[in-house]
Structure formats: C-alpha cells, structure tokens
C-alpha cells in the first residue's frame, strides 16, 4: 500500500521489518522468506536502486526455486522483474536472455 502511494522509504522499512521477523521465525528455505525478498527487491526497483534490486532478485530467485520449484509462476515473475532491472541498467542482452528464460516457465 505504501509503495502504491509513493512512500517508498516507508514501504522499504515495513518490508525490512517483515523480512527480519520471517527470517528469525522461519527456516531459511521457507517460501515466505522468498516472498519478503521479492517485495524488498520490488521496492528497490521502484526506488531506482537497480544494483540492490538486481542482487536481491538473484537471492530471491534462489530461495523461491529451492522452496517452490523451478517452474513455479513466481519464479517467472522474479525473472521478469530481474529483466526489467537489467534493461534499466542498460544490460540489454542480459534482459533479453532473462525474458526468454521467463517465457520458458
């Protein structure tokens, strides 16, 4: 909600807190850990912090693949957003490769 209202620092703070709680209470491979990583990466992307978003999408992708499987729809969504970030960073070949990977799912 805060991100939709343009309150990115509030959204980031809230997602950081949720991630911290989930990480403390759940096993490292729990799907909710991946959900929190994904939401944080989206906030970084919306803030234009593409380096941080790219790194977190990569971690999130590993977490979600491990917890939900390589063909889960969320995997495709993460790869798609990673492609958007790569495109925004001028990494056009990487963006294309990621989009093609997402389409295979």
Image (cartoon, rainbow, N blue to C red):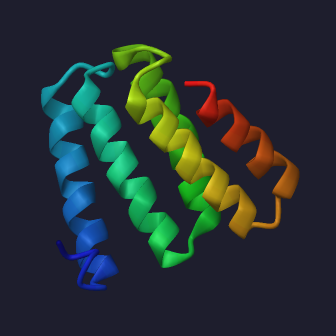
Return the x and y of residue 76 as percentages of the image width and height. 50, 35
Residue at image coords 20%, 76% = 2
Q: Quadrant of residue 43?
A: bottom left
Image-based side of 85 in relation to 75, left or right: right
Q: Quadrant of the N terminus?
A: bottom left
Residue at image coords 54%, 52% = 81
Q: Quadrant of residue 20?
A: top left
Image-based side of 91 in relation to 67, left or right: right
Return the x and y of residue 48 as percentages of the image width and height. 56, 75
- Residue 94, above or below 29: below
Return the x and y of residue 9 as percentages of the image width and height. 31, 79
Q: Residue furthest bottom?
A: 6
Residue at image coords 51%, 47% = 56
Q: Quadrant of the C terminus?
A: top right
Return the x and y of residue 45 as percentages of the image width and height. 51, 66
- Residue 9, above or below 93: below
- Residue 36, above or below 29: below
Q: Residue furthest right?
A: 93
Q: Residue furthest front?
A: 103
Nearest the viewer among 33 and 86 is 86
Image-based side of 94 in relation to 66, left or right: right
- Residue 28, above or below 102: above
Residue at image coords 57%, 70% = 49
Marks counted in the figure total 0
């Amino acid at each position: 909600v805060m991100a939709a209202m343009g309150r990115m620092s509030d959204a980031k703070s809230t997602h950081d807190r949720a991630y911290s709680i989930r990480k403390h209470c759940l096993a490292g491979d729990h799907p909710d850990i991946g959900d929190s990583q994904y939401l944080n990466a989206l906030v970084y992307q919306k803030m234009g912090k593409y380096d941080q978003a790219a790194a977190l999408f990569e971690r999130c992708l590993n977490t979600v693949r491990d917890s939900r499987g390589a063909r889960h729809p969320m995997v495709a969504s993460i790869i798609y957003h990673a492609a958007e970030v790569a495109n925004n960073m001028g990494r056009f070949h990487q963006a294309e490769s990621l989009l093609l990977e997402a389409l295979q799912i």
